[in-house]
Image (cartoon, rainbow, N blue to C red):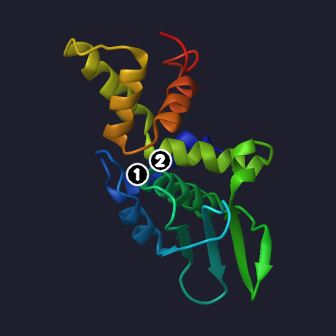
Amino acid sequence: MGRNVEEKAEELLAQTGIDSVPVDLECIAGHLGIKIRLKVFEGDLSGVLMRPRSGDPVIAINRSHNKKRQRFSLAHEIAHFQLGHAGELFVDQMVLNRRDVRSSYAIDPQEIEANAFAAALLMPRQFVFDAMVAMFEDGNVQEQTEIIGKLARTFDVSTQAMGYRLINLGLLTSVGDS
C-alpha cells in the first residue's frame, strides 16, 4: 500500500491547513479540485467518485443517508481520489468508484485502504489522542459508551466509526469493554 494511510491523511490535512475538528471535508475537496453533489441513489449506494477525462472530478453522495454517513462516504471517496485507486466501472468515459454495502465487508484491498484513510482523515490520530487526554485531565472520564459518544460528537462521526477508530488506535480493545 506504499506510505501509511495515516501519514497520507495527515499530509493532506497539513496541505489544506486544517488543524481542528470536525474536519472540513468541503475544504479538502475544494483543495483537490473535486466538486461535491448530493443525489438520491437507489438501494444502499453511499457515494461515487467520477473522474472525467476532461473537467473536474465529482463526488456524488447519497442525500437520503444521515449526515454522519454522508461525511464518512465523502471522506471515503476523497480517499479513493487521493490514493489514486483505479475505478471499478467505466461509464461514458468516466471512472467510478462506488461505495455501497459491499464496501464495509473489508474484502477488497482498495476499499480497506479507503476506509482506513477516511477514518484517519475524519478522526486524525493526534486529535483523537489530544481529545482523550483532555477528557482525562478534566476528570471528565465516564463509561466507555459515553466517551465514544462524546468523541463521536466532537469529530462529527458515528459512534460506530469512533469505536472502530479507538480500537484501531489501540485505545480500546473492543467496543464492549468498560
Q: Please name the residue that numbered disc 2 is placed on.
A: 121
Q: The disc labelled 1 sits on which kind of residue? A: Leu
Instruction: Report x, y in % for residue 134.
Output: 25, 22
66 shown above or below 170 = below
Q: The disc labelled 2 sits on which kind of residue? A: Leu
Q: Is residue 146 left or right of residue 29?
A: left
Task: From the viewer's side, name the closer residue of 28 and 136.
Answer: 136
> Would you identify the image quadrant in which residue 49 lies?
bottom right
Is residue 28 in view? yes
Q: Residue at x 60, y 42 (%)?
A: 116
Quadrant (top left/top right/bottom left/bottom right) for the N terminus: top right
Q: Is residue 79 left or right of residue 178?
A: right
Q: Nearer the viewer, mark 2 or mark 1?
A: 2
Task: From the viewer's side, name the closer residue of 36 and 52.
Answer: 36
Q: Please name the residue that numbered disc 1 is placed on.
A: 13
Q: At numbered mark 2, what does the secondary structure look like: helix, strand or loop?
A: helix
Which badge, 2 or 1, is on the more N-terminal residue? 1
Q: Crowding at label 1, few (<14), some or many (≥20) Cα neighbours within 10 Å?
A: many
> Would you identify the image quadrant in which residue 2 lies?
top right
Task: From the viewer's side, name the closer residue of 64 and 51.
Answer: 64
Q: Residue at x 79, y 79 (%)?
A: 90
Q: Which mark is residue 88?
A: none
Q: Residue at x 56, y 88 (%)?
A: 55
Is residue 2 in view? no
Q: At numbered mark 1, what does the secondary structure look like: helix, strand or loop?
A: helix
Whether label 2 touches label 1, CB < 8 Å: yes
Real-space CA distance between mark 2 and mark 1, rounded to the nearest whole angstrom: 7 Å
